[in-house]
Amino acid sequence: MAMERRELGNTGLRLSCVGFGASPLGNVFGRVYPVAAVAAVRRALDLGINFFDTSPYYGGTVSEAVLGECLSEIGAPREEIVVSTKCGRYADGFDFSAERVSRSVDESLARLKLDYVDILHCHDIEFAPSLDQIVNETIPALQKIKEKGKARFIGITGLPLQIFTYVLDRVPPGSVDVILSYCHYGINDLTLADLLPYLKSKGIGVISASPLAMGLLTENGPPEWHPASEELKSACRAAAAHCKKKGKNISKVALQYSLMNKEISTVLVGMNSPEQVEENVAAALELSNVGIDEGLVREIEEILEPVKNQTWPSGIQES
Ligand code: NAD
């Protein structure tokens, strides 16, 4: 059985419901050797994943370069894959100016060894000096990039959900095609759900990233840099331990939970090995064939109830 594909807003793109988040290829969650990276990307393609997301920020350009190397070594047919990258956020800080993002896309294309990306996102726009810069300067610059054929569609990403409505209410229709939200549609935080009718009414495609809450909902736990409060980390640890005691894996059920809402076109999971790819694809297929373990979901929800929808500050306004 093939993995489900879903329409991405009005773009005409059809994305595998599980997308390959390539931030781990930038060694963001620990060292990934090139052999493992190629094997992970190859397995993803073999198992029907057609969407790959990266950024010049991940690992200070390493993720883009490694993904580019993997795709070219494998020889993935360009028209069969959907590649997104980002601009505006870099290892040395943020710059959403027209000049920087125009240069950035050329640098990204060189690293990715591609002539165009399918989606170019403004990365974490809550860190722009003002969201009006995104509306008045960055998005118009990205339209020019689109006109030159270097990106087919334009997106915006970030953590606080209000950034999306702020920008989408102010830009001309059709200038932003997609949003990428993270850590807001999962078993511990479901706040993106409230925004879905608004996004649908505007024909905006919805990418939801980090169903494992950037490692919180894994047996190994999150990396050192994870911004969650100790209370949230410890509740997630307890939920993972509960699942393990029952012989279940919290990551599987967490991914399945995020996949259940078909208004979300794709759920981006960070992956760094063929084994993780196989586990995540198997989780999606099991969801389609058998459904989710509802009893386990209720037990996890109960453990996470005290931290339900708890998030962390992100961006200029919130820090
Ligand atoms: P995630 O919630 O997908 O968690 C990734 C972690 O889970 C990694 O440590 C990975 O090795 C591990 N993992 C994956 N599958 C597993 C499995 N089956 N069992 C156990 N552990 C497993 O978080 P993420 O990687 O931050 O998010 C996914 C992707 O979404 C990123 O790679 C990136 O492409 C994108 N993203 C974008 C933004 C943004 O634009 N601002 C923010 C976050 C994520």
Image: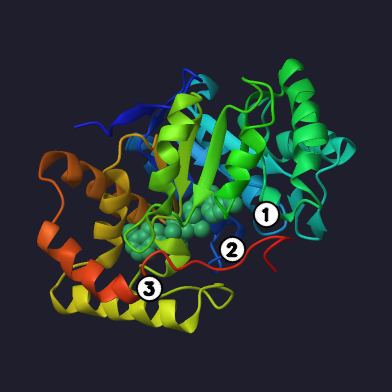
**Could you tell me which secondary element the residue under label 1 belongs to?**
helix
How much space separates mark 2 and mark 3, taking CA atoms?
A: 29 Å
The numbered mark, 2 or 3, whose residue comes first in the sequence reads 2
- In the depicted structure, whether residue 242 falls above or below residue 30: below
Contact (Cβ within 8 Å) of mark 3 with mark 1: no
CA–CA distance between discs 3 and 1?
A: 34 Å
Is the C-beta separation of discs 1 and 2 under 8 Å? yes
Relative vertical location of residue 67 with respect to residue 149 in this rendering, above or below: below
- Dot 2: element: loop
Q: Residue 19: x and y, percent?
A: 43, 42
Q: Which mark is residue 1?
A: none
Q: Which residue is mark 1?
A: 62
Pointer 2: residues within 10 angstroms few (<14), some, or many (20+)? some
Residue identified by numbered label 2? 27
Q: What is the three-letter code of the residue carrying label 3? A: Val
Determine the residue positioned at 30% across, 62% down: 251
Q: Earlier in the sequence, mark 1 or mark 2?
A: 2
318 sits to left or right of 227: right
198 is higher (above) or lower (below) than 272? above
Task: Provide residue 181's location: percent of width, then percent of height.
Answer: 51, 47
Residue 93 x/y as whole percent: 80, 59
> Could you say which disc has been placed on residue 307 in the image?
3
Left or right? Give the position of 139 relative to 219.
right
Within the image, what quadrant is residue 248 found in? bottom left
Q: Give the number of the mark in front: 3 or 1.
A: 3
